[in-house]
Amino acid sequence: MVSIDDRRHKYIYPEVKIIKNLLNKNGIHIIEDKFGKIFIKSQSNIGVVMLANDNGQLILINQYREPIESYTIQLPGGGVNQDEDIEFAARRELKEETGIDCGRVYYLGNILPASWRSNEVTHVYYTDEILSYSKQQLEGHEEIEVIRMNIQDCIDGIKENRLNDSELCYGILQAILKGFINLPEMR
């Protein structure tokens, strides 16, 4: 049975029969269950992303992702620090990765990007109130290209499977369903 203790969505799971603890490093546990399935459980499993709309231009990022050995276009975002408010974390990540300060933000919901493999939970926010642009404040390991893409091109990219990041697709869907983005005439 799953219970939710607050909006940060720290899920509590029934005990899983762990056969092997393959790795336990920096709060990340890679385990194998009695059926030979491999799972990743992280103590810092909360992430945030921001769907930013600047007058019909979405602010996206392109960055290399080692697990897929490729670049991917996605929403700016990242991890939530211990005891950090998730909305504050979403604003911080937007600023660090794109240089953008935003005004009002709206909570779109959360996604379990790979629930069959990990306990990661990503909270998705939306803003259409861009206050200022400045220089990116990237971490040492990050190389991020900021991309401005019009909404229709993004929707077409999702439809044609050229844009397939789960958090981006979820963010666009929720923004449409909640009325923040008007669905254009489908081509």
Image (tube, rainbow, N blue to C red):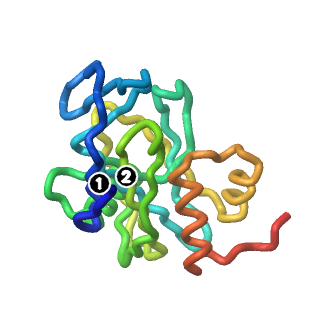
Of residue 78 and residue 173, the one placed in the foreground of this image is 173
Q: Residue at x 35, y 44 (%)?
A: 119
* Outermost residue to the right: 187
User: Relative to 76, does residue 16 appear above or below in the rendering?
Assistant: above
Of residue 94 and residue 180, the one placed in the foreground of this image is 180
Q: Residue 14's spot in the image, x, y percent?
A: 28, 46
Picture quarter containing residue 25?
Answer: top left
Picture quarter containing residue 6?
Answer: bottom left
Task: Provide the secondary structure element on which disc 2 rests.
Answer: strand
Task: Provide the secondary structure element on which disc 1 rests.
Answer: strand
Q: Residues within 10 Å of mark 2 (few under 14, many from 20)?
A: many
Do callouts 1 and 2 mark residues in contact (Cβ within 8 Å)?
A: yes
User: Relative to 180, does residue 49 appear above or below in the rendering?
Assistant: above
Q: Residue 90's spot in the image, x, y percent?
A: 33, 60
Of residue 115 and residue 183, the one placed in the foreground of this image is 115
Q: Residue at x 22, y 42 (%)?
A: 43
In this rendering, position of residue 88 left or right of residue 103: left
Q: Residue 154's spot in the image, x, y percent?
A: 67, 57
> How many numbered marks appear?
2
Of marks 1 and 2, which one's residue comes earlier in the chain?
Answer: 1
Dividing the image into 4 quarters, which one contains the C terminus? bottom right
Residue 121 numbered tag: 2
Picture quarter containing residue 172?
Answer: bottom right
Q: Nearer the viewer, mark 1 or mark 2?
A: 1
Dividing the image into 4 quarters, which one contains the N terminus? bottom left
**Label 2 sits on what residue type?**
Val
**Label 1 sits on what residue type?**
Tyr
Q: Residue 9's spot in the image, x, y percent?
A: 30, 60
In this rendering, position of residue 33 left or right of residue 151: left
Residue labelled with disc 1? 11
Q: CA distance from mark 1 to mark 2?
A: 9 Å
Q: Residue at x 26, y 52 (%)?
A: 12
